[in-house]
Image (cartoon, grey):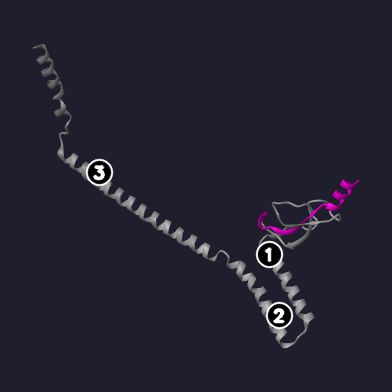
Amino acid sequence: MAKEKKIKETTIKDSPAKETKPKNNSNNKEELKDLKEQLTSEKDRVLRLSAEFENYKKRKQRESDDFKKFANETVFRQLLTVVDNLERAIFSTKENLDEEGLLEGVKLTYKEILKFLETFNVKLVEAENQPFDPNFHQAVTQAETDEFPENTVTTVLQKGYLLHDRLIRPAMVVVSKKLKKEAKETKEN
């Protein structure tokens, strides 16, 4: 019985929930209506933000695609002047057979190309008479010689180039090697 009394007491104690209910239902309905309006406006705001973000992503992707597509435009625009000079040289050889003039035109075009490369920070790899460096040189063959110290670049077969200090093409070179005849003479003695 003591247990039943405790249960009844707890249920009686729990019943004051009626007291916590607001006495005015109209205030409650207005608050609920306000909350629903706030919820609706927040949903709209979130939807708008989501749509704006999607539009932003699409716009950035379009800009990125356009940038990739036209990034080299200035390079090609400057290269067109070189093409124009070569076309003039070809046209002038058809009119007269002045070989010296043609050679001079080709030299000027070559200088213009080098100037063009400089504007885009393309630099020549120094190789001739330099110690062989596998980071910048590609050895094609070795030449036995006593004119150069061993592992020195004696001849450049194809020039190498750097772009902003990054190797874009190694120089193809011939590297010096000690003469074998000296080694044979020391064995014979």
Q: Secondary structure at mark 3?
A: helix
Q: Circle 1 sits on which residue?
A: 117
Decide which of 32, 173 is in the foreground and name it.
173
Give me the disc on residue 89.
2
Range of magenta residues: 165-189
Where is residue 182 drawn, in percent x and y? 87, 50
Where is residue 62 drawn, in percent x and y? 46, 62
Left or right of 180 in this view: 67: left
Q: How far separated are the C-alphas under marks 1 and 2?
A: 21 Å
Q: Is residue 89 visible?
A: yes
Residue drawn at (77%, 77%) of the image: 103
Q: Earlier in the sequence, mark 1 or mark 3?
A: 3
Q: Circle 3 sits on which residue?
A: 35
The residue under label 1 is which amino acid type? Leu
Residue contact at pointers 1 and 2, CB within 8 angstroms: no
Give me the disc on residue 64.
none
Please tell me whether residue 175 belongs to the stretch shown in magenta: yes
The residue under label 2 is which amino acid type? Ala
Decide which of 36, 126 is in the foreground and name it.
126
Where is residue 106 drawn, in percent x and y? 74, 75
The residue under label 3 is which amino acid type? Leu
Residue contact at pointers 3 and 2, CB within 8 angstroms: no
Q: Earlier in the sequence, mark 3 or mark 2?
A: 3
Camera-near label (1 vs 2) is 2
Q: Residue furthest right?
A: 189
Camera-near label (3 vs 2) is 2
Residue drawn at (84%, 56%) of the image: 145
Where is residue 75 drawn, in percent x and y? 62, 67
- Badge 3 local density, few (<14 within 10 Å), some, or many (20+)? few
Residue drawn at (60%, 67%) of the image: 74
